[in-house]
Image (cartoon, rainbow, N blue to C red):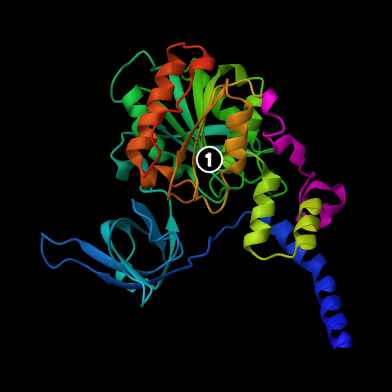
């Protein structure tokens, strides 16, 4: 027994460097083809005008949450908008939901798909007038969508720039455009390095916010050159980390009125520790993986052009360095980026940071679960912000949580 135990322990120890290397590379390497890991059992088109189209899907912790979502299939060639839950069969592990619209592809032949938070593939499907624009960034031109406001208000020269998260694309920001339209603010939905639309970084690796922010700086410059006098940044997940870096490091930060952060990465080390735990990575492997990302010695394994300084990405510790008003919208049930650091930041810097907590919503799906609370909270905050009220009064603590 002692010999067997020793052999097993030796095998685990020997595997730690390999597991750490895989973990580190996965964190910083873009995934060109996200996994379609949701089983699609059957698509049932309606036979009359009174009943909706339905789809039977595997039960997961995401497919059983209320709201509107996208189902992406056939290697991202097909996209459908999925709506209300009709039934859940826990015994068979099947959830049936309404299919509100199929934008592309043949859902009847799909067997696997990806559950996504965006709802519309482009502004056209969302009903917005828009135009394609190109932003000059390091290494080339990054595509963006410009959505003008439908009505003229005093906020027409303050642009809302959306910054999508890791592994997502600019259509993630379409869920913010209802707010922008109601405020009379132009919207600029941007792409940035390594997202599959903008030019890749030279090392083709994520900097977790530390290297991406110059692309958003270029977007601000584009806005200023095309009629904006100021901007509001709306960052999702890693896009929040990008936005926070810009607000601290860019010479154009003085044109940023405030930041709206959805499911934000406030402290990357906390996120990586959480991901290591839920993926059952041995603690030494997770710790070594994080070291490989932040150490010059790990560059040959990660492929990073320069190590990532996690201290610069920890806004709980750097809460006193925040200079812009911030509104955080974060779900207590976020299973990818835990809510803890958002709560800590809001507690440590109450003068500038306001926070709205949601329930049930998964990662960056706050709008999907409760669009009314999502939009009303941001509208209230923006009206206070843009009408010149003191940052110390930017409090939304009385807003109700999503039920």
- The residue at 28%/39% (across/down) is 127
Q: Is residue 109 above or below residue 329?
A: below
Q: Give the magenta range.
A: 293-321
Q: Is residue 214 left or right of residue 104?
A: right
Q: Is residue 117 left or right of residue 85?
A: right
Q: Is residue 319 left or right of residue 260?
A: right
In the foreground, 105 or 126: 126
Q: Quadrant of residue 247?
A: top right
Q: Residues within 10 Å of mark 1 (few under 14, many from 20)?
A: many
Q: Is residue 14 above or below residue 159?
A: below
- The residue at 76%/49% (across/down) is 304
Query: Which percent across, then down, holds residue 313?
Result: 70, 37
Q: Which residue is label 1 attached to? A: 191
- The residue at 42%/12% (across/down) is 387
Query: Which percent across, then down, holds residue 381?
Result: 43, 23
User: Can residue 215 be seen by looking at this rendering?
Assistant: no
Q: Is residue 267 left or right of residue 152?
A: right
Quadrant of the frame with the C terminus: top left
The magenta stretch spans residue 300:
yes
């Amino acid at each position: 027994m002692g010999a067997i135990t020793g052999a097993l322990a030796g095998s685990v120890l020997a595997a730690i460097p390999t597991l750490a290397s895989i973990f580190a590379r996965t964190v910083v390497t873009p995934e060109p083809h996200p996994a379609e890991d949701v089983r699609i059992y059957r698509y049932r088109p309606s036979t009359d005008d009174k009943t909706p189209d339905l789809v039977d899907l595997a039960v997961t912790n995401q497919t059983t949450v209320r709201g509107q979502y996208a189902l992406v299939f056939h290697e991202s060639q097909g996209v459908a908008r999925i709506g209300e839950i009709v039934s859940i069969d826990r015994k068979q592990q099947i959830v049936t939901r309404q299919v509100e619209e199929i934008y592309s592809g043949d859902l009847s032949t799909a067997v696997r798909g990806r559950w996504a938070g965006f709802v519309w593939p482009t502004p056209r499907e969302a009903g917005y007038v828009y135009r394609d624009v190109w932003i000059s960034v390091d290494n080339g031109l990054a595509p963006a969508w410009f959505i003008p406001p439908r009505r003229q208000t005093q906020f027409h020269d303050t642009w809302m720039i959306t910054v999508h998260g890791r592994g997502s694309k600019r259509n993630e920001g379409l869920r913010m455009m209802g707010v922008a339209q109601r405020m009379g603010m132009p919207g600029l939905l941007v792409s940035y390095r390594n997202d599959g639309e903008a030019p890749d970084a030279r090392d083709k690796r994520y900097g977790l916010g530390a290297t991406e922010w110059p692309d958003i700086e270029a977007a601000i410059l584009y806005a200023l050159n095309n009629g904006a006098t100021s901007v509001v940044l709306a960052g999702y997940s890693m896009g929040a980390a990008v936005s926070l870096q810009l607000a601290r490091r860019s010479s154009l930060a003085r044109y940023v009125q405030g930041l709206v952060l959805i499911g934000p990465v406030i402290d990357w080390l906390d996120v990586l520790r959480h991901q290591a735990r839920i993926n059952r990575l041995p603690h030494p492997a997770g710790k070594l993986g994080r070291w490989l990302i932040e150490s010059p010695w790990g560059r040959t394994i990660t492929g990073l052009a320069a190590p990532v300084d996690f201290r610069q990405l920890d806004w709980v510790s750097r809460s006193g360095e925040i200079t812009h008003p911030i509104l955080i919208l974060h779900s207590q049930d976020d299973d990818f980026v835990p809510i803890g650091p958002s709560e800590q930041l809001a507690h440590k810097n109450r003068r500038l940071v306001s926070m709205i907590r949601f329930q049930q919503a998964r990662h960056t799906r706050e709008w999907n679960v409760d669009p009314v609370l999502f939009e009303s909270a941001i509208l209230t905050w923006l009206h206070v912000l843009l009408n010149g009220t003191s940052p110390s009064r930017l409090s939304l603590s009385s807003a109700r949580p999503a039920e």
